[in-house]
Image (cartoon, coloured by chain):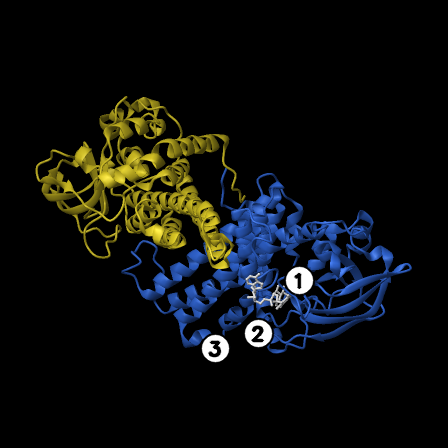
Amino acid sequence: MISFELSEEQTSVREAMQGFASDVLRPAAREYDEASAIPDLFFQQAWALGLTATQIPESYGGYGAERSPFTNALVLEELAYGDAALAVAAMTPCLFANALLDHGTDEQKQAHLAAFCGDSFHTGSLALSEPKPGFDPFAPSTTAEKKGSGYTLHGVKSFVPLAASAAHFVVIARSEDGLDAFIVPRDTPGLTVSETEKNLGLKALQTSELRLDGVDLPAAQRLGGAKGADVRRLINQGRVAISAVLTGLSRAVLDYCVPYSKERVAFDEPIAQKQSIAFRLAEMHMEIESSRWMTWKAASDLEAGRDATRSATMAKRYVAEKSMWISDNGVQVLGGHGFIREHPVELWYRNARTLGVLEGTATV
Amino acid sequence: MVNFELSKNDKTVLDALRSESLIARKYARQYDENEHEFPPDELPEAKDHPNFMSHMATRGAEDSGGSVMMTLIAMGSTWGDYSVRLRRRDSGLGNSALKAAGTPEQIEKWGGLTLAMAITEPGCGSDPSQVRTTATLDGDNWVINGEKIFVTTGCRADGVVVWATLDRSAGRAGIKSFLVEKGAPGFIVAHKEKKLGIRADDTAAYVFEDCRIPRSNLLGGKEEIPKGGSGGFKGVMKTFNMTRPLVAGLGLGMAEAALDFTREELSRAGIDIAYDVQGTTQSAAAAKFIELESAFEAAKLTMLRASWLADKGETNNIEASVSKAKAGGAVRDITQGCIEILGPMGISRAHLLEKWFRDVRITDIYEGTGEIQRMIIARGLLDYTRKELN
Ligand SMILES: Cc1cc2nc3c(=O)[nH]c(=O)nc-3n(C[C@H](O)[C@H](O)[C@H](O)COP(=O)(O)OP(=O)(O)OC[C@H]3O[C@@H](n4cnc5c(N)ncnc54)[C@H](O)[C@@H]3O)c2cc1C
């Protein structure tokens, strides 16, 4: 049956995230963007929300709530309404933990998950993107060659969030079995983590490049062991996550433009009374609604364990395009003021362009 | 729980409708090219084919709501053809108005008729508060004078709900709806329009010349004109909260047909639509197709959202406008884009794609143009009245 009804629990998670986004994320967004860094205090505050530990089963030390990609999509939209960079940062531990939860063997879960259930911030990360034109996550250039009973990895990964503080990485590579994933400890010989990358947007989020020059791994480090991992699902989860983040960002833009355009007067009346502004706002609203339902649909495919390749790809492409358009209009509605860093619309404009081309930076 | 999957019962209804639509589609071209003919009330195949609506009799808690189903049925019907049906089941727009505004006696009396809705006049469409058709009380009769145009099902309907003003100086509050049955003295069906698309659909022009109807034919029965405000006008406009998602569905059914046709033709040409390939490196045709398909999905989801809210009994005026405006834009992009993808074969009358391209164009016009929907949405967002934004 067709239903848009959130459960009571989903509604209350959503409300909690709204509070955190407006109390913590939004007020800090500009400062951290200017500093190109996020202070430890923020990571501790976000850690206290239990975003990662909540969905880890009790047997591995977590709170044992149901693993729910759909609820995580709700969380991401709300956090990103506060700030996209901080939303992605707060959820980065999930990038690694959820990959293990969903695809890891029991031994791999035993070995890694407990660290995500402690009192202090702990993170791993996911290395999916690669620095080349038209990067396609389904066809990575990074290779994993069979060598004896283990594997050797070669390649370059980019935009790996919080790589500087991650203890482990899940690295996506192409092996003889197709798409494959490996758990790589950060001190493995042959692995180098670059200086922090300098990017157009999500500036507060520190990301790095990873070089894998003949990284030798025992077979036990292959995610999912002999069975391997469902990397397609991992990619789809990333696409849904980016869609959710961009939906929250778009909403932030519209909610900023509405009061601004009612106050700003030109030619004797509020600019909101001009149709070219008012209709633009209406279209922004239409596309925010559309973006959310596209995201929800793909998230509910993931939730039910269905193949979400089609719905997640459509959601990501659609939402990326619309959020770019919305944030572009956000700048235009503010005119010259939109170009000045005193207002957040220029930040949202940069972030929308950045997120739209990312893969594997967030997960649900 | 949020759910986008149809139940087993939902599917049974829509599958049965699909098989009816496949039959209707065989007649689509014939009635498009012969605009003066009306499609029959029943196609010859009807006698061997059970009515899909019979499956709507058994519904349970796990099935989609009534309004959601009506929008999906609207889509499933026009997927076959906009106008041709295995069996006609048009309850006209006037029937929605009767249901929304009529007294119980009026609903009882006229509920079984097919009723058209006549608001638009030669001098006013988007702004119905400018209606000039007049109704004057004369003893136990209303006397109606004026012209109405673009009346859907105007020729075939048994009667029509007409908007007329009792007093132009009272503005919107002076406008009332009246039920006029065919055959009322002074009620003339002037002609049937020739159109770009939906040609088998009848669109009529009416003239009322001292047309006399009983005093009890005023819908809702309230003769007094309230002082200030919009009177019953806003209430009457609420009918559109139900019909706009349906109109979205009518358009989207044809857009889906266009997408299905295009996908099949591409596949025949060896171009498969892959979703696990980056858009920048896949073929332009496939990338464009996914873009159009996404526009379809987005519009369909806003339609489902608006009708789901209606089923819950929640306010949905903004959502209804969102769905109508989204569909109005999407169906144009989709049919224009499908022709672009297929090239010359897309414009050939040997296929239905060029017809769908013409037929869907009405979606962004009637029941309030795309601009009017944007105005409604913007007023909602900005908390503006019609004075502040018009
Ligand atoms: C096939 C068909 C079936 C129809 N069926 C019915 C029916 O059953 N009953 C009925 O009553 N009517 C019906 N209509 C009429 C239809 O609802 C109107 O045509 C429509 O509402 C637009 O009105 P208009 O044609 O007078 O255009 P206008 O109002 O003249 O509009 C012209 C243009 O101006 C724009 N515009 C108008 N006002 C504004 C504004 N304030 N701000 C910005 N832009 C504005 C419009 O969006 C449009 O683009 C039908 C029309 C067609 C073609």
Amino acid type indicated by mark 2? Leu
Q: Which mark is residue A258?
A: none
Q: Between residues A83 and A209, which one lies in front from this camera angle? A: A83
| Residue underneath mark 3 | B348
Crowd around label 1: few <14 · some 14–19 · many ≥20 (10 Å): few
Crowd around label 3: few <14 · some 14–19 · many ≥20 (10 Å): few
User: Which one is earlier in the sequence, the residue at label 1 or at label 3?
Assistant: 1
| Residue underneath mark 2 | B196
Are the residues at dot 3 and dot 2 in contact (C-beta closer than 8 Å)? no
| Residue underneath mark 1 | B48
- What color was chain A assigned in the picture? yellow
Amino acid type indicated by mark 3? Ser
Q: Nearer the viewer, mark 1 or mark 3?
A: 3
Are the residues at dot 1 and dot 2 in contact (C-beta closer than 8 Å)? no
- In terms of image quarters, where does ligand 1 lie? bottom right
- What kind of element bears circle 1? helix
Q: Is residue A214 above or below residue B329?
A: above
